[in-house]
Amino acid sequence: MFHSSKLVAALGTLVLLAAAASAQNQPTTYIYDAYVDNQTTVNTCSAGENVNLNGTIRFSYQVTTDSTGNHFVIKAASNLTGVGQTTGVNYTAVESNEYDSDTMDSSKDMTVELKSDLTPQGATPSMTLVQDLHITADTNGSITAEVVSNDTSCGGAN
Amino acid sequence: MLHQLKIWSAVVLIAVLTCTPLAVANGDPMTITKFTQDSVITDQHLINDCNGEEVVLNGTMHFELTTGIDADGDRTLYDLDSTTRLLGEGMTTHVRYVSVDKIHQHDVTHGGQSSNTRSSTKFRLVAQGPVPDLISRVTMHTVINRNGTILVQRENEKISCR
């Protein structure tokens, strides 16, 4: 399925090249913050309510090149809060995942999933927020990223 | 070392469902092909980091792959939906765990290259009884060829109760 629907991801600014290669042969780390601005997911596991999400997803990546091609290492770290639109319950989601790709291409275009516990305040996490992230990056340090969907999963109950 | 256990999924079935010339995004005519594939996870032994108990996992992985190849064969899209169904059992407590987990990934390559990616992810093994659920953290190494062959290696899998 090719995702055509895109929830609005307020794209953040391309921040900087972090870690200014203190060691000369260390690959540069490029950082990009995508802002999640009032995106909605549905708690399908218990309350059945819409949850408005806000926060950031920080993307950082490195690319190295050798005789076998280019090796992209992309990390996504979310720091989100949510508010249930029916109950007013506050939720949090904090997670980081890594996505690697080995390719001869000088750019990478991939859509991946970031799964995090969507935890209601004061409760044990039992629900997973599943975000599809569309990421493009190249060997020159350019990166774009956006959240294309927000869904929830209930683990073994699904 | 159990945590470094690497299991290549055994290919049980590959079925080419359709092969349809289509025009898709940005006017680039593409040939779309759909594949399904099933594999089995057998007796994967892991240690629950929380209490040291050995947990054995068995299950299946079902893949639904869509490839798109443009007219000159330069650009290839790989769109993969995988469903992992696992049953686990604690070897000491005999508590049983159940998990159904779905992953979607989409990759674009050029020059006829395969898709070669690794994604870290986690999924929940729901306990069948009044004990904590387990969380599995695993890196999925996925290699997909243009002919629809899918190889998935579960790397560095760890389970814990948090």
Image: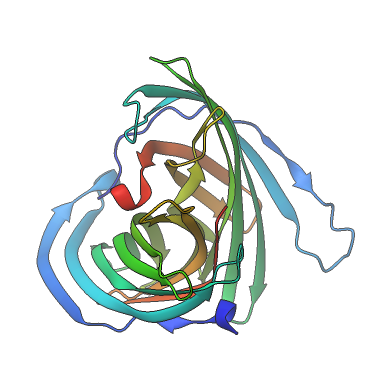
Q: Residue at x 45, y 45 (%)?
A: A134
Instruction: Report whether A123 appears left or right of B106.
Output: right
Q: Is residue A153 above or below residue A105?
A: above
Q: Is residue A131 visible?
A: yes
Q: Residue at x 19, y 68 (%)?
A: B35
Q: Residue at x 56, y 29 (%)?
A: A122
Q: Residue at x 30, y 84 (%)?
A: B10
Query: Where, by quadrant of the figure, is residue A43 drawn?
Result: top left
Name the spot of residue B96 as percent of width and height, x first: 37, 64
Q: Is residue B94 above or below residue A83?
A: below
Name the spot of residue A51 as percent of width and height, x first: 42, 24
Name the spot of residue B33 as percent of width and height, x first: 17, 65
Name the spot of residue B13 as percent of width and height, x first: 18, 79
**Closer to the camera, A42 or A5?**
A42
Colour scheme: rainbow
Q: Is residue B148 visible?
A: no
In this view, the residue farthest toward the right is A22
Instruction: Report whether B153 appears left or right of B12.
Output: right
Instruction: Report whether A124 appears left or right of A14.
Output: left
Total marks shown come to 0
**Closer to the camera, B1 or A98?**
B1
Instruction: Report whether A58 appears left or right of A144.
Output: right
Q: Is residue A58 above or below residue B50?
A: above
**Closer to the camera, B130 or A76?**
B130
Q: Is residue A123 above or below residue A77?
A: above
